[in-house]
Image (cartoon, grey):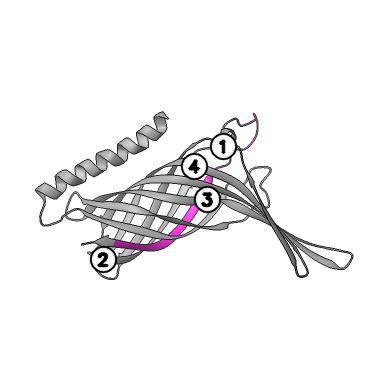
Amino acid sequence: MKKLILGLAVTASSLAFAQQTTSTSSSNPVTFGVKGGMNVSSLSKGADLSDSKSKIGFNAGVFANIPVASSFSIQPEVLYNDLGSKVTREYTVLGNNYKDESSTNLGYIAVPVMFQYNATPEFFLEAGPEFGFLVSANDKFKSSTNNNTSTRTRSLDKDNFNTFNFGIGIGAGYYFTPNLGITARYTAGLTDIAKNRPSNSDAIRNNVFQVGLAYKFK
């Protein structure tokens, strides 16, 4: 709960600063917008994840862009982040081809706070922390052979996971128009997703590459 309050406090402070900046700066006003796109996420490979692969997911949310100097701005965001990883196995038994897919799906409310350098009015570089709060966890299984496919989903006990996730993100973006742009970001998790990690075992962390579109309201 303290970590949730911390993340929300960071967002609230940034938005309060945005309101103050809006009233004091007319040449570079604060802008608000929406963004969304594709996630390519993975879990760092511990001993039990040696064959895990990246999983395709999505992200979507809102942001405020707060100019603090002619070439610098702060961008707090609130996003839904679909993270996790996938394992695929293919094998043949008695002439029948089988394919099994198992994906771990972790849903987070993420609060990135990006510090952006505006190299040109259209192009920017960014880096900053991301605070995440786990809201859902499940495993999805898909098995197929010849023309038959079966799928099932199993909810995971969130008490086995750290509900707080912390990471560092770096990225870039380009606005084709004053309103519409494309963004790309890689966020490396620094927090073990497991709450009670056995001794002498490897930590497992979230990692994600994101690409998508951003729209500023002006």
Q: Earlier in the sequence, mark 4 or mark 3?
A: 3
Residue type for callout 1: Lys
Residue type for callout 4: Val
Residue at 58% x, 36% y is 194
Residue type for callout 3: Leu
Mark 3, other Cα within 10 Å: few <14 / some 14–19 / many ≥20: many
Residue in the foreground of this view, choosing between 27 and 133: 133
- Which percent across, then down, holds residue 42? 56, 52
Helix, strand or loop at mark 1: helix
- 129 relative to 174, above or below: above
Q: Which residue is mark 4?
A: 135
Q: Which residue is mark 1?
A: 158
In the image, is residue 131 part of the stretch drawn in magenta? no
Checking the image for residue 179, the label placed there is: 2
Checking the image for residue 50, the label placed there is: none
Q: Earlier in the sequence, mark 1 or mark 4?
A: 4
Q: Residues in magenta?
A: 196-215
